[in-house]
Amino acid sequence: MDVYLMIQRQKKTILLDTKDTMTIYDLKDMISYIINVPAVDQELYFKDQLLDDELTLSDYGIIPNAAKAQNPANIGLAVRMPDGNFEELKIDEYSTTPDVPTFLKPQDSPDASDQASYSN
């Protein structure tokens, strides 16, 4: 069945619709076509746990009820650096929108008693 994933690495986010029976290696292979990094040079993490290439997404509890389109499972991605070591897993937080300036906030409407009545 379909599961929805949000793969994150630093400032990059990839949204994927996959099957819960997909192996971690197959997921890495899918990611390799998107980011141009071979599967062997990727590490995937779920809940701070390094994922094993031979296991499936469902083995890690990534199932349709837990990874919906409205709330995808968050998978961290680290890649191998030129020195042969894997980078530290780093996911940058999304920026937050600033507060709406006071003059743009909706004002409370005046009570009916404050409004002038008009007669025809």
Image (cartoon, grey):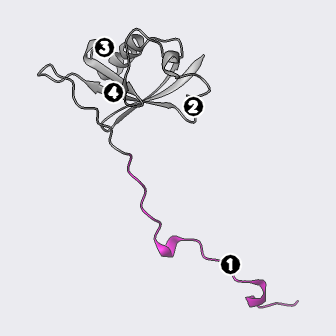
Q: Quadrant of the C terminus?
A: bottom right
Q: Which residues are magenta?
A: 94-120
2 or 1: tag closer to the N-terminus: 2
Q: Secondary structure at mark 1?
A: loop
Residue drawn at x 48%, y 20% is 60
Residue 37 drawn above or below residue 116: above
| Sooner in the amino-acid sequence: mark 4 or mark 1 | 4
Marks 2/1: CA–CA distance: 38 Å
Q: Are marks 4 and 3 in contact (CB under 8 Å)?
A: no
Counting residues from the start of the chain, the first of labels 4 and 2 encountered is 2
Query: Mark on residue 69?
Result: 2
What amino acid is labelled 4 in the image? Leu
CA distance separating discs 4 and 3: 11 Å
Position of residue 117 relative to residue 75, above or below, is below
Identify residue for label 3.
39
Q: Residues within 10 Å of mark 1 (few under 14, many from 20)?
A: few
Residue 22 is labelled as none
For mark 2, give the secondary structure.
Answer: loop
Q: Which residue is mark 1?
A: 109
Circles 4, 2 touching at the beta carbon (< 8 Å)? no
- Residue 86 relative to residue 70: left or right: left
Q: Secondary structure at mark 3?
A: helix
- State whether the magenta stretch is mostly helix, strand or loop: loop
Q: Earlier in the sequence, mark 1 or mark 3?
A: 3
| Front of the two marks 4 and 2 | 4
CB atoms at circles 4 and 1 under 8 Å apart? Answer: no
Q: Is residue 18 magenta?
A: no
Q: Please rate how many residues cluster around mark 3, counting C-alpha atoms within 10 Å: few if below 14, some from 14 to 19, many from 20.
A: some
Residue identified by numbered label 4: 77
Task: Give x and y (percent) for residue 4.
Answer: 52, 26
Q: Nearer the viewer, mark 1 or mark 3?
A: 3
